Image (cartoon, helix red, strand yellow):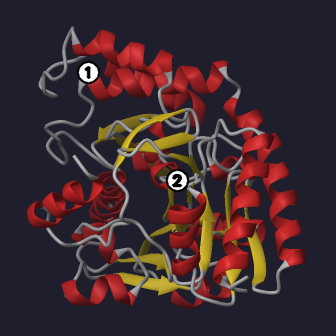
Amino acid sequence: MKKQQYIDRAEQAFYKVYNRFPVVFDHGQGVYLYDTDGQEYLDFGAGIAVMGLGYGCRELNDAMKHQIDKLCHISNLFYNEPAIEAGEKLLKVSDMEKVFFTNSGTEAVEGLLKIAKRYAYDKGMAPDYEIIAMKHSFHGRSIGALSLTGNDHYQKPFAPLVSGIRFADFNDLDSVKALWSEKTCAVIMETIQGEGGIYPATEEFLTGVRALCDENEALLLLDEIQCGMGRSGHMFAWQGYGIKPDAMSVAKALGNGVPVGAFLARGKAAAAMVPGDHGTTYGGNPFVCAAASKVLDLFEEKRIVDHVREIGAYLWKRLDELVERYDCLVAHRGKGLMQGLELTVPAGPLVTHALLEEKLVLISAGRNIIRFVPPLVIEKQDVDEMVKRLANAIEEVIFQK
């Protein structure tokens, strides 16, 4: 079947909420994707920071094949071994106390929101309490997660949202202090803002917010869905700041393509939920947890975090060279293998040209940011090839050479 036939069928069948690129991918291997016409693409998007181990990882595939012949689902009315193993491993690398497995990152954020609300209820604050979130943040598309997302474009069509959410300026501690009151029960933020433009929290800001929460017996909730699982050069980005959240969300690379997320908590946040407060039908089932468990094993065996630090530094150097070379690139920021280039022009045409003409998969973050979130297993030669293809795209699209 021809590519356009697939696209036509999809446009007839699917709810029109995505503006998809005209490519139909068929399979992947390592850091490359292949479309239905057999063309090869270098992937620096990783399914939006999901495919940390790349495509066709044999050890992970074998683990999933083994589990699918045993048991895929049993419900949370019973225990299952893969969930126990995955939970223990996730708690070990995060130094948290309790874990709840979800189907997605959005659901993990919903869990954080419910922890904050239950904590406020137990303190006698409900219903008159407030949560401080950040402007330009992104936490998901459900009503709860959307209520915490500081972007009018996403929120406006679905108002009214959850009440009691106030928005501070990211990396501006005075902005948080200005919103703080006796009603404040929690602060939530991404440790590195993703959709908002690849902005890492500054050390002063994150440690300052942690101190505010400690002084006022409020919870610090960190969204590590995109920046977690090794992408920053630490297993979780907050581990590079010398602080610890009360609860956190994780997903994306946790399953390397299998839909699994989790929220984790410690101390008063771990004690905030009681039987009957939360639940899920599919979350934590044996199949997804067998995948998550193997992913966590492979991260350790392959020393992924060390690799990210090495290759992330090389990516930084090569992207800095592009910034020096082209006036249209005005800023470079990020950590590890989560980096962004800010352009003087919209990123969309450049990303599209890179995909269709240079066979390079990139994604944007906002209107004028190119986001680099490749598989965590890329090597220096992959970075070099990406830079070459991106430079070609810049020359063609922006300078029209």
- Mark 1 neighbour class, 10 Å CA radius: few under 14, some 14 to 19, many 20 or more: many
Residue type, numbered disc 2: Glu
Q: Is residue 222 above or below residue 255?
A: below
Question: Against 262, is 171 above or below?
Answer: below
Residue 401, picture quadrant: bottom right
Task: Specify few, some or many for label 2: CA neighbours under 10 Å numbering under 14, 14-19, or 20 or more.
Answer: many
Q: Is residue 153 rendered to the left or right of residue 360?
A: left
Q: Nearer the viewer, residue 51 or 173?
A: 51
Q: CA distance from mark 1 to mark 2?
A: 23 Å
Kindly identify the amino acid type of the residue bearing the numbered disc 1.
Pro
Q: Residue at x 60, y 27 (%)?
A: 299
Query: Residue 173 location, x and y as percent?
Result: 67, 81
Residue 217, percent from left and from top: 51, 64
Is residue 151 rendered to the left or right of residue 79? right
**Residue denoted by label 1:** 286
Q: Which mark is residue 224?
A: 2
Q: Is residue 11 left or right of residue 391?
A: left
Q: Residue at x 79, y 50 (%)?
A: 384
Q: Residue drawn 20% across and 84% down? A: 158
Q: Residue 122 in the image: x percent, y percent?
A: 29, 59
Q: Earlier in the sequence, mark 1 or mark 2?
A: 2
Q: x, y (%) of residue 265?
A: 45, 44
